[in-house]
Amino acid sequence: MTPLGRLLRGVRAGAHRSPLAHRAFDAPASISVSSTAFTDGGGMPTSSAGQGVGDNVSPPLRWTALPPRTRQAVLIIDDVDVPLPRPLLHTVAVIEPTLDGLDAGGLRPGAPGIRCLRADLGHRGYAGPRPIPGHGPHHYRFHVFAIEHAVPDHITTAKALLAAMRGHVLARGVLTGTYER
């Protein structure tokens, strides 16, 4: 355990501080999200951990039950345990509704049917877990949202995407993985 991890062990953003906790994102939790790499609430493999910790390979994901009116799906991966004022958005992507999942490593810029937007740390594409050593387990939520309109191409950041999604979410689902260093 590192001194910084010990010092910050009790400091966590919390799900209640997530921009996704806003009422504008309320929708039926009718989308089922799963992975063959980990179970809901289970530990994520080291291969999915971020650069310098693991291989930074996005885990395989599957989802079901997008409503018929879905124009696009949105995948957002956040860390609710980061020691910051709000959860950190690790990965943000707009996905064509014809896709029902992603293979391992499939969450990357240029992948067919996927548009990776700039997340909180300024990168595009998958950014796996890299919690502070000794901080304890972090919960990484893989949110899938079905939205009723297409996201315009000029939207390139997580903040702009969240604003565009407000009030347009038809359904949602979530899969949570944990990772600890």
Image (tube, grey):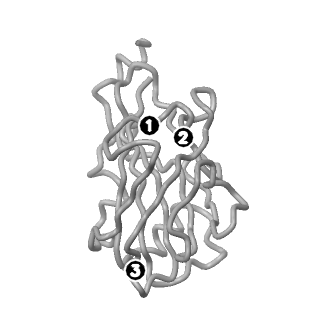
Q: Nearer the viewer, mark 1 or mark 2?
A: 1
**Around disc 3, counting alpha carbons within 10 Å, would you say few (fewer than 14), some (14 to 19), or many (20 or more)?**
some
C-alpha gap between disc 3 and disc 2: 28 Å
SS at badge 3 = loop
Q: Earlier in the sequence, mark 1 or mark 2?
A: 1
Relative height, residue 178 to residue 124 (above, below): above
Q: Residue at x 53, y 46 (%)?
A: 59
C-alpha gap between disc 1 and disc 2: 10 Å
Q: Earlier in the sequence, mark 3 or mark 2?
A: 2
Relative height, residue 162 to residue 82 (above, below): below
Q: Mark 3 points at which residue?
A: 168
Q: Which amino acid does label 2 sit on?
A: Gly
Q: Name the residue under label 1.
A: 44
SS at badge 1 = loop
Q: What residue type is labelled 1?
A: Met
Q: Name the residue under label 2.
A: 128
C-alpha gap between disc 1 and disc 3: 31 Å
Q: Residue at x 54, y 40 (%)?
A: 128
Q: Which of marks 1 and 3 is in front?
A: 1
Using the image as rendered, state which of residue 12 and residue 69 is in the foreground.
69
Q: What residue type is labelled 3?
A: His
**Around disc 2, counting alpha carbons within 10 Å, would you say few (fewer than 14), some (14 to 19), or many (20 or more)?**
many
Q: Which residue is drawn at 56% across and 62% down?
A: 93
Disc 1 + disc 2, Cβ < 8 Å: yes
Q: State the residue lying farthest toward the bottom.
A: 69
Relative height, residue 33 to residue 126 (above, below): below
Please identify the quadrant where the N terminus is shown: top left
**Around disc 1, counting alpha carbons within 10 Å, would you say few (fewer than 14), some (14 to 19), or many (20 or more)?**
many
Q: Where does the image place residue 113, in percent across and percent down from the top left?
A: 64, 70
